[in-house]
Image: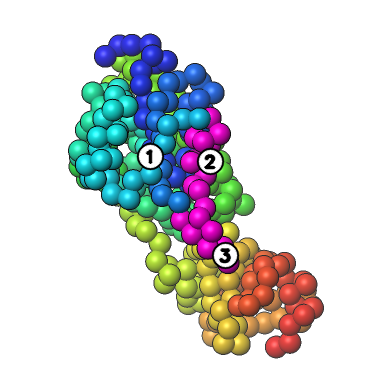
Amino acid sequence: MNKDPKSIRIVFMGTPDFAVASLQALLDGGLNVVGVITAPDKPAGRGLALQQSPVKELAVANKIPLLQPLKLKDPQFLEQLAAWKPDLQVVVAFRMLPEVVWALPPMGTINLHGSLLPNYRGAAPINWALINGEKKTGVTTFLLKHEIDTGDLLLQRELEIEQTDNFGTLYNKLKVMGAKVLTETIERYVQEKITPVPQSNFEQLLKAAPKLQKETGEIDWNCAGTAINNLIRGLSPLPGAFAKLDGKLLKIYKATPLEEKISVPPGTIDTDGKNFLRFACQDGWIQIEELQLEGKKKMPITPFLQGYRF
């Protein structure tokens, strides 16, 4: 298999902004991307105009052949994919592939994942690392096989999670890191400088990263302040952790836990009506810094309190 990485034919699969950095890195590195597969255009906005995926926009801008299949087992799609004659496929933030797709190239299919596998297999690894209060995370490249996120490991890079990180900031850091690790993986893998390692070598205490559900974001004020703050960080800016304020949905994007002995029930609201709003929790207060009330815009706490009457 030892070849010049720039000589092999690569098909790239991805859809969101997270995948754009990786596709751009492959192009900047002079790798031969012969085709891109992304999600079909979807209606969005008030006018429901069809919106292209971020990956499609980059592919079109670089005049790369593009496929947008509704079904990955569609015979016409499989015929078009085979006609590209890929030596290797690369997947970043796409959907689950059937074996008829991932097993097509002679060199296999490489996936980039936003966690240190085998921990945080699943759809939302960045969110769950924050929600669970992890101190570090990272990215992993691995070879696809039948079970999701279980293939042999290729490369990993660690990243320290800062206390100020939320989903948005960590997403952007891992997006950039992942693009670099992916290009390095391809170059070393093609030149046979990587030995794939089975994940079974590391499967001890695994944490999962299932798809986020609406109820995931509901704040339980009976929990400790640190746990509530981690939930807020893990869901900010999207989809947002939430509670109720005077019967209306309140999304909370930034907060500070204040540990102190209190004698009021969890969920109790305390405010001066001008500069601070806080909720009682198991071991103190959660002081709100940025929020959005149902029907209103997202804003810092001070302007919110100036316009709100309890």
> Mark 1: few, some, or many residues within 10 Å (few <14, many ≥20)?
some
Query: N-terminal of the two: label 1 or label 2?
Result: 2
Q: Which residue is painted at 33% across and 11% down in the image? A: 3
Dividing the picture into quadrants, the one containing residue 296 is bottom right
Label 3 belongs to which residue?
47
Give me the residue at 60% from left, 64% from top. Answer: 253
Disc ID at residue 168: none
Q: Which residue is mark 1?
A: 67
* Mark 3 closeness class: few <14, some 14–19, many ≥20 residues within 10 Å: few
Indicate the secondary structure of the residue bearing disc 2: helix
**Residue 179 counted in the magenta span:** no
Residue range of the region highlighted in magenta in the rendering: 42-62
Residue 193, quarter of picture: top left
Label 1 to label 3, Cα distance in Å? Answer: 25 Å
The amino acid type, in three-letter code, at marker 2 is: Glu
Whichever of callouts 2 and 3 sits on the residue coming sooner in the sequence is 3
Relative placement, left or right, of 98 versus 230 is left
Closer mark to the observer between disc 2 and disc 3: 3
Query: Which residue is tagged 2?
Result: 57
